[in-house]
Each structure stands twice: as C-alpha cells, then as structure tokens.
Image (tube, rainbow, N blue to C red):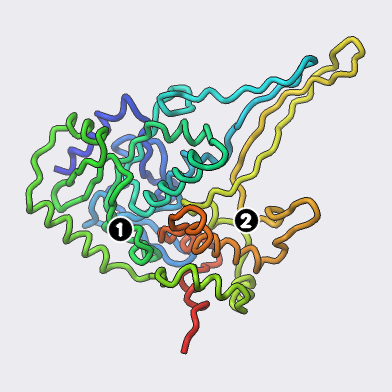
Amino acid sequence: MKSRLKDFFEVLGPSYRIIGPKIENGVVILAEIKYGDIPAGYRDSQKPGRYRLSPEKDSQVFSFSSGPDSFKRFLNPPLAELFHFHRFETGLGITSPPFSEKGGISETGLPICFMGIRACDLWALKLYDRIFPGGRVRDRTYESLRRNSLIIAFNCLYPSGNCFCLSTGTGPEVKDTFDVAVTELKDSFLLEEGSARGKEILGLLPLGHAGERQSLEKRERIETCKALFRKSIAADELPEIIFRNLDHPHWEDIARRDLECGNCTQVCPTCFCNTSYDFVYPGGISGEDKCNLELSGRRLRKWDSCFSRDFAQVHGGNFRLSRKARYRHWMAHKLAYMQDQFGLPGCVGCGRCITWCPAGIDITRELEALRPHS
C-alpha cells in the first residue's frame, strides 16, 4: 500500500534531516519535510520559460517532475563559510567551521537524506563527487555534508515537457549512486537496495516480497515514460558540434535574446562556479607602539555565474567581455569541456535551464541550430 511510504519517515526521521519535495509559492521545491509535505496528486506543466503546478484528480503520489531545486543547494550551499580568521599582535589564527563527523554542519549534526532524487540529478551528484572531494583543493564543507548522506532515489515516470535526459543517457531510470531506489506502481511502491546501508534500512521496514509482476510493471512504466519525451539533443555528436562552431553566427542571435540573469546557472545541478571574499571586522589598536590594528573576519564562498560580467575579470582586463562569449562559454562548458575535464556529462538533460529562463532560451534548439543542415 502506498500509505506505507510513511514508514520511511518514521524509520529515518530520528537519524536524518529528510530533504524532499514540497510546495512553496506554487512551485515544487526541496526542503526539510515531513510525510504530509509531499505534494501527492499534483502535476506540473513546463515549457520554455514557463512552469505551472496544479492538482489532478487521477495523479499518483509522485506525478510531478523536478522543480528548480536539486541536491546542489544543500551540499554546495549558495553561501558557505570557509574559515574564520583573527589577526593578533603575535600572528594570525585561522579556525575552520565545526564540521560533524556524522556528516552535517547544522547544530544537530544530522546527515542528510535526499528523498525523491531523480536519475538526472544522480549523474550530477557523481560529477560533484569527482569535483569537490576528488579535486585539487579539498572541500571540507562538501565532504562534511556528503558524508553519510542517504539517497532515496525515484525512477522518473513523468518527465516534464523540457526534459531530455533520455538522449543524454542520464535517465529516466536510476542505475547507481543510490542507497534505495523506489518505483511507484499502480497500488504500491517497489523498493530496491543499492548499498549495504540501503539494505539495512529496508530491513527496518515492514515490507512484502516483490515478485515478477511488480518487476514487469516497473519495466512497463519506465518504457511508457521514455515514450513521453518530446525533447532531445544529438549527444552522439558532442563535443564536436561545439568545437567546430565556436565562430558560428548563431551565437550572436542567442546573445540578442539572452538577459544575462544567470537563472540557468542557479538551477543547473552541475554548475559549480563560485567566488570568495573576506568579510572583515576591524578591531582596536594594540601593542606598545599602538600601530597594530586587530582584525577578524570570515572567508565566505558564494555561488557565482559565468554570465556575470566580472566573472572573467583578471589582472589586466576581462577576457570574456561580450554576451555572446559568455553564453558560448556556458553552453560549451555544459556540452563539451566538462566531459573532457571530468569524464562525465556536464549536461544531464534535466531541462531546468529551459523552464527557468525568462527569455525561454532552449539549449536543445540552440544546439540544433549549430548543426550543419543540407
């Protein structure tokens, strides 16, 4: 029975902060939730630059597709403290944030459980796991939040009108990087373990045995989902399409429509560009000669966007002055550079950049316009 989904919350609630879908201001977002927060029976309509959410009588519990949020906002917060510093008369002291060995930086120190994460975001999470803990600079904020995080993934059965993960090979079925995979069937949920911890959690739930009928229904529902996709990209022709067309006149056409708002980078689950700055608190004058100014402050990191005009500002000038160059860089990073850098796709086909672009710019159409046509 689908009402047994509540058992998940009873088992996980004492040990995890459960992050899952809820409705806020007419949009399905991710937030810390209880069982009653799940927007059961709602469907969304997404088009370029358009999102509408409404209840539907015959909808199932998870009939909605992804909203603007992903795991990114929780594992790579929009604003994070890297360290606190204080300059004394005798030297400089640096203190790191109070990271929890359990995997959290909140007062409770509880690790995160992501409830309802989809296949496209699991691919983005794999990319983040390669960039942050495995990068050249150790990111302790990400490590602490990711440590012991639990992934309850859901097979996507209702793609939005802007999804194209089928053509990027990143969905709609979850394959790995999860602890428990869930498929919503007609009258129940099919649960599958993906890790030792997932097996342990399933052992705490009052479950029945799934048979061939449930496995067959799962396959049928995923195949039905695949038939619902309306957007695609020529993924097999990447990254060559980008590299062959860096001087294509179509970049100018995009630049005339682009607002440089950065919405696409904010909602993209793979974008990770950031900047850091020091927030300084001037202190008093100390020392016998009264010449030592005591300073304390925090080094903060916040999200940034390659659409920001100053993002490419370096000593000596700005090497990406035009709007055309900034959009071209973003699209090339998604569809070409990341694959070369990290061996994983930089675009997971979630379609968020299409939905939340106020100008309705559609990356699938823009890529198609770069292809040679006979």
Q: Could you tell whether 168 is left or right of 355 in the image?
A: left
Whole-percent x, y for residue 239 in the image: 49, 68
Where's the N terminus, which quadrant? top left
Badge 1 is on which residue?
Answer: 172
Whole-percent x, y for residue 316 in the image: 81, 54
Name the kind of residue labelled 2 in the image. Answer: Cys
Q: Element under label 2? A: loop
Residue 306 image label: 2
Residue 352 visible (yes or no): no
Q: CA distance from mark 1 to mark 2?
A: 29 Å
Q: Could you tell whether 143 is left or right of 9 in the image?
A: right
Q: Residue at x 62, y 79 (%)?
A: 249
Q: Nearer the viewer, residue 77 or 21?
A: 77
Q: Residue at x 42, y 50 (%)?
A: 124
Q: Residues within 10 Å of mark 2 (few under 14, many from 20)?
A: many
Q: Nearer the viewer, residue 21 or 148?
A: 148
Whole-percent x, y for residue 196 in the image: 25, 34
Eyeballing the image, is 242 above or below 205? below
Q: Residue at x 84, y 14 (%)?
A: 286
